Amino acid sequence: MSGAPRPKDRPWLMRTYAGHSTAEASNELYRRNLAKGQTGLSVAFDLPTQTGYDPDHVLARGEVGRVGVPVSHLGDMRRLFQEIPLERMNTSMTINATAMWLLALYQVVAEEHGADVATLQGTTQNDIVKEYLSRGTHVFPPSPSLRLTTDMIAYTVHHIPKWNPINICSYHLQEAGATPVQEIAYAMATAISVLDAVFASGQVPEDRKGDVVARISFFVNAGVRFIEEMCKMRAFGRVWDRITRERYGIENPKHRRFRYGVQVNSLGLTEAQPENNVQRIVLEMLAVTLSKDARARAVQLPAWNEALGLPRPWDQQWSLRIQQVLAHESDLLEYDDIFEGSRVIETKVAALVEEAEAEIERIQEMGGAMAAVESGYLKARLVASHAERRARIEAGEEKIVGVNCYQSTEPNPLTADLDTAIMTVDPQNEARVVSALHAWRERREEGPAQEALAALRKAAAGTENLMPATLRCARAGVTTGEWAWALRDVFGEFRAPTGVGGAPVAVAAEAGSPLAAVREKVGKTAAELGGGRLRLLVGKPGLDGHSNGAEQIAVRARDAGFEVVYQGIRLTPEQIVAAAVAEDVHCVGLSILSGSHAELVPDVLERLRGAGAGDIPVIVGGIIPAADAAALRAAGVAAVFTPKDFGITEIIGRIVDEIRAANTLPPLEVPV
């Protein structure tokens, strides 16, 4: 009978993104999640690990174990996967600049478990382009970064054939403001750059090209506009099929299949009325599961309270149960593609494909994704798209329930005690991790470690594949920071374009508009203070590379008449204070989303006072719990903004108010 149920498909891999504090604590969490029915691991590494610093480096201060697990050497990796059978596990590791290093550590631990390396299954994210554009955990310049990726892909094809050596990410592009067309185009342009480099390297014979293409996977975002998002997934598949067939001559349709995992949208999770995040997560999950022909291979869902802070194990369990109910209680997996033949869906998919292919061609004409990164084109387009979206939200054109509409609410029992509604990392954890690192260095044999590092530098200066030298470093007890610094010595470091200067005006300052009122406040205050325009320094201290919020503040402040000093990410408090003094700014704005605000903000305040600039008001923005916000204000911070403060123009107006108060000017009654 037509349309009758058929045997159920196998469910997708179910993951939760997890890791915190220490390898031991994360290992316990993984084993508990697996016991609850999770079918794959998704490892979150802390920012020092992601950016190639040991936990005792000055830039690691306040960041150790905050947004993931610190892995500084082979001993940490052993403890992370203790009593977990790696030969039977599918492990996803969110790691990019240091992906080769973490895969080497994982391989050595698997060998110690007695596993056959050729059977290992999992994914290393390893997409450096999106780090330049959105997440900011890049280390090396584009060319050597691409070499690391190329070497790793070639190595895995020959030695770990079931491993996905790269997970090209459009997820983070959407978080940075990308439209569906930009997501498809930028991810595909990245894939073209990677495949071109792999095949040009000569490390893969012609008859293995299909094996390379078959192991390329993607990591995709799914927003709440779930029909558009589902169409995006179908469009992704069509574009990928054409590129792999026409550009690379891949004939086997299994090799050309668009293989993707998904984390549904975290950008859209709200601090206001956070209970609404549950239905957002469900709708976003449906976008990547309803269509059989474009169904994700793996799904991980954020927790309802991620806009508030670090989710607890119970919150992660809730997200896992959402997946399990859909897969095991509904009839979703019993039917063929339910959208086949839909004229509405086909029209939307065709439009997305056409627009995305036009943008891919535009990028190729520039010289490809890497050239478009270095020129600043891709970053500027994302900053502009994000600014346009924020403007629509502020104008009420794009509605966010509980944020810019339907704001009245009953008391929320989930957040009645905010201090227990999220998990916090013990502030003493960092000291323990640093102490353990020092003990590791003291116990290892120094000779083999230094010889391995010397061999790595020599390999980096030449042309040989870097994976064998990296494995030697892992076995010799080299640390994450030492491995990365050896490569920094050869490759140098890279500061990506911020995209702020090239972003067009997103909000018009027409007469009577809120921005016009703020411009008036800025102009009058500057005139009263003398010395030209008001100057705002926007600073990103520590290793938090999520710069979207900082960029949007910088762009709107510029449009309001400020002179903006924004030097990008990854600055020490000392560097921020030096810039504030040198540029004689009227206000310092700090953006921190990684949880390191309690360490880094007081350091900036203390250094400003020490430099004789303690009268400069400091404002802070980020994911900051209420108790921490109160502590920061008590320490001398003028104002604290969190995601619930979605009105950027209003924030700029508040900054002017704080500048006036700091300079003992009377309040300026200009409606905003």
Image (cartoon, rainbow, N blue to C red):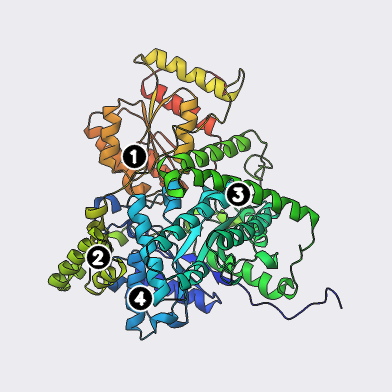
Q: Is residue 194 above or below residue 639?
A: below
CA neighbours of label 1 inside 10 A, class few (<14), some (14 to 19), many (20+): few
Quick one: label 2 or label 1, which is nearer the N terminus?
2
- Element under label 4? helix
Closer to the eye: label 2 or 1 = 2
- Element under label 1? helix
Quick one: label 4 or label 2, which is nearer the N terminus?
4
- Element under label 3? helix
CA neighbours of label 2 inside 10 A, class few (<14), some (14 to 19), many (20+): many
Please state the horizontal and vertical placement of residue 50, each as a whole percent of the image.
36, 58
Report whether 470 appears left or right of 353: left
Residue receiving disc 2: 479
Please state the horizontal and vertical placement of residue 404, each as a whole percent of the image.
64, 39
Quick one: label 3 or label 4, which is nearer the N terminus?
4
Locate the N terminus and report the quarter of the image it occupies. bottom right
Residue positioned 51% across, 42% down in the render? 382
- Which mark, residue 15? none
Mark 4–mark 2 distance (CA, rounded to whole Å): 16 Å
Furthest toward the right, the residue is 1
Q: Amino acid at mark 4?
A: Gln
- Which mark, residue 107? 4
The quarter of the displayed image where residue 487 is located: bottom left
Mark 2–mark 1 distance (CA, rounded to whole Å): 36 Å
Residue receiving disc 3: 357
Of residues 357 and 423, the one drawn nearer to the viewer in this rendering: 357
Closer to the eye: label 3 or 4 = 3
Residue receiving disc 1: 635
Q: Amino acid at mark 1?
A: Ala
Q: Is residue 270 above or below residue 119?
A: above
